Amino acid sequence: MTPFYQSVELNTRERLSLAPGSYGSSSQPGLKILAYIDKASKVDKSGAMRHSFLVGALRPSREQLQAAAHAAGNGKSGATPFDEPEYEGTAFLSVTVHSDWSHPAALAMAFTEATRNKDGKLGHDYLAEAIASGEVDPQLAKDGQAYYRQIATDKVTAANTPPEKMEEAVESQYRKELMAISIKMGQLFTLQDWAGMERDPGRDPVLLVGTEFSGKVETSNLGQGQSEVASIYSRKKEKVSA
């Protein structure tokens, strides 16, 4: 029989929340994914999987460093140019993915829509390129557009939108659906860039544990003094030697 004390929970430390601020830069990581939180990772009503992680800091935030430098410059009591602010605590990070979003057609549609400016002009047509290269079948692209437009139509109808505003509302919601995909999958790809992985929409997000990256931490909407990673900064691409 295994002694009971082998399973006694010994982690009795108080969990501190990471201070809000920007950690790291495009070339130097400031945060690190410490663990995958299995109990907090769940499937939402749309069928997307919300993966939850625990994140710690590798160094103080930019705001903390600026405050420390200001205090030292003003000769405040006890402050020296060599003092480094405390950066204890952890924050939560959510990475949401859906099996539908991993299809090349959905990705091409989403990232194409993300380049559209306020005047409605596309900055880059990834979908057209993917079709031309043979990576995406033209019929699958049409089917995908019809699929997300139907999702948009259903949501607008459920909101009791007046008939005269249906067309405009559907188009707006359709763009929101694609933009959501580009944002969520963009976060996944950015973390994979930081991890030195090849971008792969089907790779298990659990493999991101241990990844060092940069991002902005804010106070969580959940309250209770918790903090969360609100945005992930893109990694600066390394120059390829000729």
Image (cartoon, grey):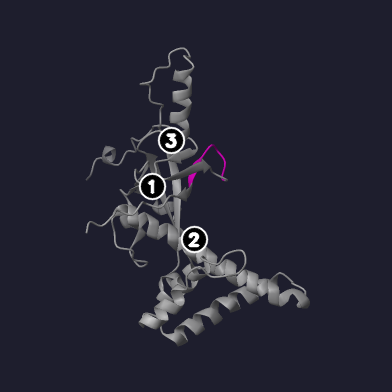
Q: Name the residue under label 2.
A: 183
Q: Is mark 1 on a helix, strand or loop?
A: loop
- Give the magenta range: 222-229
Q: Is residue 150 above or below residue 59?
A: below
Q: Position of residue 47 (x, y in %)?
A: 49, 68
Taking the view exactly as shown, the residue that stands out farthest to the top is 77
Q: Name the residue under label 1.
A: 26
Q: Which amino acid does label 2 sit on?
A: Ile
| Mark positioned earlier in the residue sequence (1 or 3) | 1
Q: Alpha-carbon distance for marks 2 and 3?
A: 24 Å
Q: What residue type is labelled 1?
A: Ser
* Labels 1 & 3 near each other (Cβ < 8 A): no
Q: Name the residue under label 3.
A: 61
Q: Position of residue 25 (x, y in %)?
A: 39, 43
* Foreground residue among 47 and 59: 59
Q: What residue type is labelled 3?
A: Ser
Is 30 on the left or on the right of 178, as rendered?
left
